[in-house]
């Protein structure tokens, strides 16, 4: 594993830096802000400077499924006649291809 070499230490530092930046971005985005509409002034993180574009919502296209269909239950069918399982046969012990095979049921 390369995590314990000198190159791995550098990679861990890069990953830690990326994780720190990601958490900082999430924290800035998730902080509480006044509930003003986006088109009014004063929306932003500091001193009234911020994003003045409307929020963009991306959703998948709507899916129009057909209405559910009622299927009538099947007619009553008589249970099949009793099926007797085949009888098992005892196979005695033997040599098979140079190997000893103990007796067993089929």
Image (tube, rainbow, N blue to C red):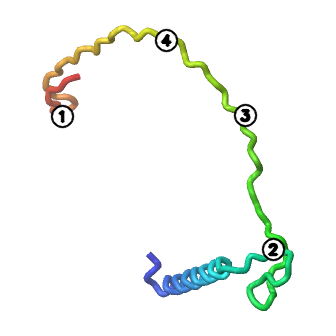
Question: Nearer the N terminus, badge 2 or badge 1?
Answer: 2
Question: Nearer the N terminus, badge 3 or badge 4?
Answer: 3
Question: Nearer the N terminus, badge 2 or badge 3?
Answer: 2
Q: Quadrant of the C terminus?
A: top left
Q: Residues within 10 Å of mark 3 (few under 14, many from 20)?
A: few
Q: Residue 99: which numbered mark, if any?
A: 1
Picture quadrant of residue 57: bottom right
Q: Residue 66: which numbered mark, if any?
A: 3
Distance between the alpha carbons at the discs numbered 2 and 4 = 64 Å
Q: Residue at x 17, y 26 (%)?
A: 104
Q: Residue at x 46, y 79 (%)?
A: 3
Q: Residue 37: which numbered mark, if any?
A: 2
Q: Residue 76: which numbered mark, if any?
A: 4
Residue 100's x, y, as percent? Answer: 15, 32
Q: Is residue 31 above or below residue 84?
A: below
Distance between the alpha carbons at the discs numbered 2 and 3 = 39 Å
| Nearer the camera: disc 1 or disc 4 | 4
Q: Residues within 10 Å of mark 4 (few under 14, many from 20)?
A: few
Question: Nearer the N terminus, badge 3 or badge 1?
Answer: 3
Horizontal side of residue 42 vs 25, given as left or right: right
Picture quadrant of residue 59: bottom right
Question: Nearer the N terminus, badge 1 or badge 4?
Answer: 4
Q: Is residue 99 above or below residue 81?
A: below
Residue 8's x, y, as percent? Answer: 49, 82
């Amino acid at each position: 594993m390369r995590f314990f070499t000198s190159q791995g230490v550098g990679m861990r530092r890069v990953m830690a830096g990326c994780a720190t930046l990601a958490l900082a971005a999430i924290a800035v985005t998730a902080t509480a802000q006044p509930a003003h509409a986006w088109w009014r002034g004063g929306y932003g993180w500091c001193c009234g400077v911020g994003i003045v574009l409307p929020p963009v919502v991306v959703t998948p296209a709507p899916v129009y499924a057909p209405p559910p269909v009622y299927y009538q239950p099947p007619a009553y069918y008589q249970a099949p006649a009793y099926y007797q399982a085949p009888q098992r046969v005892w196979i005695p012990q033997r040599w098979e291809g140079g190997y000893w095979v103990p007796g067993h049921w089929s």
